[in-house]
Amino acid sequence: MVTMTIEKNRLLPHLARLDTRWLHDDDFKKELNKRIKEAESQILSNWNPHKKLEFMKMTLRSEAGALIGERKRKVKHKEDMINEELETAMDILLNTDLTNIDREKLRDHIDDLKMQKKEQQWRQQIVSAKQELQSKVLVEKQHLILKRIQWQLVLVLKERQSDLQKLV
């Protein structure tokens, strides 16, 4: 299941943080970029840089939140439709007199609906796992970069220390 985490921001507790795992989804990024470019065209030329920055931050938060909400509603709607159709088919199967052929067709249809429901859940689990993995990979890359910088700093400090010892 795809989620938007709402964490308390320590500096500004009234602002919610968006789940950045969504940024690994190319379709999400394209749509968000499109919406931001549309909003960018609304910026007036006489605005000062601070006002432009605040407008773009507000736009980014609101558009990302709206886009996440739209996607979650689509998934929920599809799940609700499958569940409703499954419930109707089960009611018909249990509460009406059907021929054996119709009963078999209805059972096949119910099995198809159950499979669709499982596939929908699997897709959501796969998307969620993929986003989590991409986030972990990104954190790991950042960690490696920091380690490399740390080693470079150690080497520079050792060089400086040896240069100082030569001067003394």
Image (tube, rainbow, N blue to C red):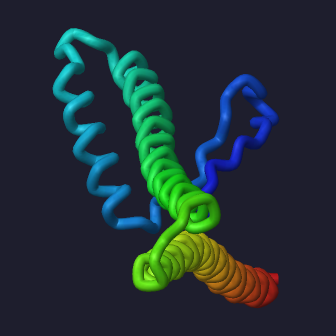
> Picture quarter containing residue 28?
bottom left
Residue 62 appears in the picture as rendered:
yes
Quarter in which the N terminus is drawn: bottom right
> Picture quarter containing residue 168?
bottom right
Give the vertical position of 12 relative to 152 (above or below): above
Residue found at the far top of this picture: 46
Which residue is pictured at 40% across the width and 35% down the height? 63
User: In the rendered picture of this protein, how many numbered marks are placed on residues?
Assistant: 0
Which residue is pictured at 46% across the width and 60% down the height? 23
Query: Residue 123: where, in percent of width, then height?
Result: 51, 75
Which residue is pictured at 17% across the width and 15% down the height? 45
Query: Residue 68: where, in percent of width, then height?
Result: 48, 46
Query: Residue 134: where, in percent of width, then height?
Result: 56, 77
Give the vertical position of 86 relative to 141 (above or below): above
Residue 167 appears in the picture as rendered:
no
Nearest the viewer among 117 and 59 is 117
Nearest the viewer among 35 and 96 is 96
Nearest the viewer among 96 and 125 is 96
Q: Is residue 87 left or right of residue 43?
A: right
Q: Is residue 66 left or right of residue 49?
A: right
Query: Residue 115: where, in percent of width, then height?
Result: 52, 80
Nearest the viewer among 41 and 126 is 126
Give the vertical position of 94 relative to 52 (above or below): below
Which residue is pictured at 20% across the width and 20% down the height? 42
